[in-house]
Amino acid sequence: MSVPLSILDLASISEGSTARDAIAASMESARLADALGFHRFWFAEHHNTPNLASSATSLLISQAASVTKRIRVGAGGVMLPNHAPLMVAEQYGTLANMHGARIDLGLGRAPGTDMMTAQALSRSSSEPQAFANSIYDLQGWFSDTGTAHSTSIESAVSAGTQVPIWVLGSTVNGASIAGQLGLPFSVASHFAPDQLDAAIQVYRDSFTTESPTAQIDKPYVMAGINVLVADTDEEARREFTVIEQMFLDLHSGQRRKIQPPVDPESLAGHGGGGQPMLRIKAVGAPQTVKAQLEEFVERTGADELITTTYAYDPAVRDHSLQLLADCWF
């Protein structure tokens, strides 16, 4: 039951702090995660968001890799429509050359932002076949030849790095793409839980090793879950209102930085306690969270869990990581 645990970080910016503060706190969490035995530390790409500093993910990955020794570090993920695939190959090949075989590349088809910002960033197509073709080219640039499959363009800096590629998704469509490409699948159930069970089933049913992009010999699922561990269930429930307020702001169009925790009852009238997007969660004291995580693994059959924890005070997040490691590893 004790599957590996990983961390998804978005370098959240709390009210009264700056992006510089958020990035520094994120690096401290990466150091702690490395020491505690977590498997991966990934950064998610977001744009035009006042409360997140995770926009230039390759730079965050490089810094996190520099301050850690063992943990895998990567993108969860690169929103490929925002990037030229060749540039992604060059960036992640450079990371692999600088930091060794600890770099992961997770790829998504969503823009990770609003439509106006997406248009400003757009560099490649999000259509399924174009997405698959880009992955095939990326694998070529990461191969020993360093040459894409659809062109003679060579990337010397990524040649031979063999950076592992993941497909990210939250629906049966993304799951089908991951399965047909023979790649590991990271399902975004921590904010998009509606198709979780169906997506995992579709991924496993569609998985094939016959695709030229296949990198693994059997399906591998990493599922996302919101986690907040505190000394008591009541304290954890209060701290979880930080992300509930964030999602309420998202729905109302209010653009605020990460807010301090509040009395959970104060959010009840605003739907905060029943946020459907956040229902995949493990919140409470250590043994409460351990039981919830075990139940989630039993439900999904996940090979690995990737946890996300928002806190107004970075010390609260790091305490949560410590308690989680103590009860799981």
Image (cartoon, rainbow, N blue to C red):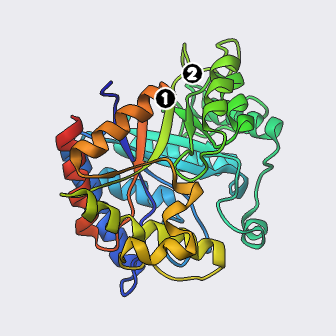
Q: Which label number is shown at residue 215?
A: 2
Rendering quarter of residue 206: top right
| Location of the N terminus (image quadrant) | top left
Q: Decide: few, some or many residues near mark 1? Use Cα within 10 Å; few <14, some 14-19, many ≥20.
A: few
First along the sequence among labels 1 and 2: 2
Write the residue at 59% across / 51% down: 78
Q: Classify 305 as above or below 8.
A: above
Residue tagged by mark 1?
299
Q: Classify 164 as above or below 224.
A: above
Q: In the figure, is residue 160 to the left or right of 312?
A: right
Question: In what element is the residue under mark 2?
Answer: loop
Q: In the figure, is residue 267 to the left or right of 141?
A: left
Between 99 and 228, the one nearer to me in the picture = 228
- Of circles 1 and 2, the one toward us is 1
Q: Classify 94 as above or below 275.
A: above
Between 73 and 169, the one nearer to me in the picture = 169
Is residue 269 visible in the rendered image? The answer is: yes
The location of residue 268, given as percent across then percent down, is 50, 72
Q: Which label number is shown at residue 96?
A: none
Which amino acid is tagged 2? Gln
Which amino acid is tagged 1? Arg
Between 112 and 158, the one nearer to me in the picture = 112
Looking at the rendered structure, the number of numbered marks drawn on it comes to: 2
Write the residue at 69% across / 58% down: 111
Q: Are marks 1 and 2 in contact (CB under 8 Å)?
A: no
The location of residue 303, given as percent across then percent down, is 44, 26
The location of residue 34, given as percent across then percent down, is 24, 46
Rendering quarter of residue 22: bottom left
| Location of the C terminus (image quadrant) | top left
Q: CA distance from mark 1 to mark 2?
A: 26 Å
The location of residue 168, given as percent across then percent down, is 60, 41
Write the residue at 41% across / 70% down: 242
